[in-house]
């Protein structure tokens, strides 16, 4: 029986408008909808008077102008970045030109992998380098707000969540979203790290998740548990494919993603590869050659 993830896509909003979505939390959604961003990048404004901005989004002048309108008469003192995909961090440079606030993040694109000599995938924001490096457990203190840094590698190696401590609201970036699972794309994306990061969230007491895309997750722990079980189900599907003689990822994807449009198959293949790489690393599968997207796989 398939894992039932309680996805939610419904969201009432207007592009360019700052909506109060929780105590001390406003959100402005960029007009960059896509199959990977749902309605677009949700940028959050924390606090009042002296505020933090979480994920300024793409390099979109209209979106940055909306953020400046929303914070007129206030000071943007901090810019917090969950990770460095192109719909999250490039807006930092445009926003800093107006406010001069420092950026806070785990590191540049690939941080967490580059130190191990592992190259990262193209498509990241290679120009971004944070003004301040943050690590798991760090506290960032603002005016009437404070944030705890929660390191959650997996979707990317530099992925950081941020908890608004005053309301126990966790800004989850792309690590946990309410409308879709995250794409895990090696080598920067890593399934073992992703699952460990999900397990970490089960140990926490966050009251609500605010992803960068889509609506809030108001019952976090069952949602996270469903995500973990979903990945376990994918592994069972991979075993089933191999047992049926299907040992190439390109042939597994249509069987495993029957309700997914074909144009999404390349992204799905990356996630299947991430799962297989994890299974190989722990000795459940072996490859007929190098461990890559094109190899054949069988049970160990």
Image (spheres, rainbow, N blue to C red):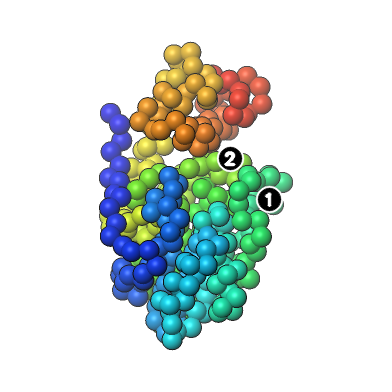
Crowd around label 1: few <14 · some 14–19 · many ≥20 (10 Å) = some
For the question of whether residue 72 can be seen, the reply is: yes
Residue identifier under label 2: 186
Quadrant of the image for the C terminus? top right
Establish if 98 lies above or below 6: below
Q: Residue at x 53, y 60 (%)?
A: 58
Task: Judge left or right: residue 145 versus residue 106.
Answer: left
x, y percent for residue 299: 52, 19
Q: Residue at x 42, y 20 (%)?
A: 240
Tell me the quarter of the picture where residue 126 sits: bottom right
Residue identifier under label 1: 114
Q: Are marks 1 and 2 in contact (CB under 8 Å)?
A: no
Report the residue that reaches farthest toward the top: 245
For the question of whether residue 134 can be seen, the reply is: no
- Sequence-wise, the earlier of marks 1 and 2 is 1
Tell me the quarter of the picture where residue 93 sits: bottom right
Crowd around label 2: few <14 · some 14–19 · many ≥20 (10 Å) = many
x, y percent for residue 198: 43, 49
Q: Residue at x 52, y 33 (%)?
A: 266
Report the residue that reaches farthest toward the right: 117
x, y percent for residue 1: 28, 28
Task: Judge left or right: residue 281 versus residue 239.
Answer: right
The disc placed on residue 132 is none
The number of numbered discs placed on residues in the rendered structure image is 2
x, y percent for residue 259: 35, 31
Viewer-side residue, 207 vs 56: 56
**What is the distance, in whole Å, between disc 1 and disc 2 at their CAs?**
13 Å
Secondary structure of the residue carrying tag 2 is loop
Q: Residue at x 58, y 23 (%)?
A: 286
Secondary structure of the residue carrying tag 1 is helix
């Amino acid at each position: 029986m398939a894992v039932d993830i309680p996805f939610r896509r419904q969201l009432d909003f207007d592009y360019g408008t700052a909506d109060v979505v929780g105590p001390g939390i406003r959100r402005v959604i960029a007009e960059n909808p896509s199959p990977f961003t749902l309605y677009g990048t949700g940028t959050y404004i924390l606090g009042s008077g002296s505020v933090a901005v979480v994920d300024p989004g793409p390099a979109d002048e209209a979106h940055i102008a909306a953020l400046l309108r929303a914070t007129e008469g206030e000071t943007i003192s901090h810019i917090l970045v969950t990770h460095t995909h192109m719909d999250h961090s490039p807006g930092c440079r445009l926003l800093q030109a107006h406010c001069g606030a420092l950026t806070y993040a785990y590191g540049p694109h690939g941080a967490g992998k580059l130190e191990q000599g592992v190259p990262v995938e193209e498509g990241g924001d290679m120009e971004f380098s944070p003004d301040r490096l943050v690590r798991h457990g760090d506290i960032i203190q603002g005016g009437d707000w404070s944030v705890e840094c929660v390191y959650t590698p997996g979707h990317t190696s530099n992925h950081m969540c941020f908890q608004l401590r005053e309301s126990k609201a966790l800004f989850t970036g792309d690590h946990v979203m309410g409308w879709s699972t995250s794409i895990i794309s090696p080598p920067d994306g890593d399934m073992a790290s992703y699952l460990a990061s999900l397990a970490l969230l089960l140990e926490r007491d966050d009251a609500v998740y605010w992803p960068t895309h889509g609506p809030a997750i108001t019952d976090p722990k069952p949602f996270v548990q469903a995500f973990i079980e979903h990945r376990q189900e994918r592994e069972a599907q991979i075993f089933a494919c191999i047992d049926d003689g299907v040992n190439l990822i390109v042939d597994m994807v249509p069987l495993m993603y029957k309700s997914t449009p074909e144009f999404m198959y390349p992204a799905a293949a990356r996630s299947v590869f991430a799962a297989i790489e994890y299974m190989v690393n722990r000795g459940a599968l072996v490859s007929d050659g190098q461990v890559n997207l094109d190899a054949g796989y069988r049970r160990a």
